[in-house]
Image: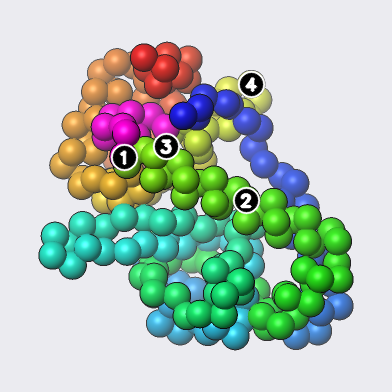
Amino acid sequence: MNSTTLVEQPTNQQLILSEIQKSPLVSQHSKKLFLKKGDDPLNTLDTRNNFYFVMNGKIKIYQIELNSAKEQTLYLLGRSDMFDVLSLLDGSENEYISEVLEDAELIAVPMEDIREMILKDSGFRHYFYAYLAEKLRSMENLALSLSFYDVYQRLLQLFTKFTYIKDNKPVLKTIDNLKHEDLASMIGTVRKVLNRSLQKLKQDGVIELSRKNIRIKNFQKLLDKLNI
């Protein structure tokens, strides 16, 4: 699986999202919602009748295996993400668990308005299908990672996915200040096992660890280890 492409900090989705807010359908029927850290939005959001655009913040969407209490993060939603695409497509209620990791601002739009936009607005349709393809690819990569790679390799893949170029330097975004429990949940493991891989990467000079942050120290080394 190829996870070694370093990309620029994405801005196109954010620009398109700002244009979407100007759509007559969105501006006429939308409403802003504010969620606090620690909230479980799926206890309050109506994902069967409303579609949501994430304007700011971080929301974790996950499942728990009840017998072992092991978590698996399915999506980490941030600015320019949308939710819930599956409910929009098949009309069913989701069965996810969710948690707000950072105070979040959402825009809620009736599902029927979004369906109409997909049919009539070519710009939004292109944006929506590109986003859908990205999420399907992400789930495919997650399934392959869990099947074929150990925790150390999955952590390397995760860091590569969220590393962007800023001022010609690699910068870890979005996941840089997550709790280790949340990082572990993203790659299908537990904190104790994750911490061993983090310490190995630190010893190898790939990352720097502080109490609340992870910094990519040597991105080339990260890529080299990913390709071993």
Crowd band around label 1 with a 10 angstrom C-alpha radius: few (<14), some (14–19), many (20+): few
Q: Nearer the viewer, mark 3 or mark 4?
A: 3
Q: Marks 4 and 1: CB-CB under 8 Å?
A: no
Q: Marks 3 and 2: CB-CB under 8 Å?
A: no
Separation of residues labelled 1 and 2 (CA atoms): 21 Å
Mainly helix, strand or loop, the magenta region?
helix
Q: Which residue is mark 3?
A: 158
First reached walking from the N terminus: tag 4 or tag 2: 2
Q: Identify the element where label 3 is drawn.
A: helix
- Whether residue 135 appears in magenta in the rendering, the answer is no
**Left or right of 117 in this view: 96:** left
Crowd band around label 2 with a 10 angstrom C-alpha radius: few (<14), some (14–19), many (20+): few
Separation of residues labelled 3 and 1 (CA atoms): 15 Å
Q: Quadrant of the C terminus?
A: top left
Q: Which residue is mark 4?
A: 168
Q: Identify the element where label 4 is drawn.
A: loop
Magenta residue span? 147-157
Q: List x then y, in percent, for residue 92.
A: 51, 80
Q: Which amino acid, by three-letter code, is at mark 1? A: Ser
Q: Marks 1 and 2: CB-CB under 8 Å?
A: no
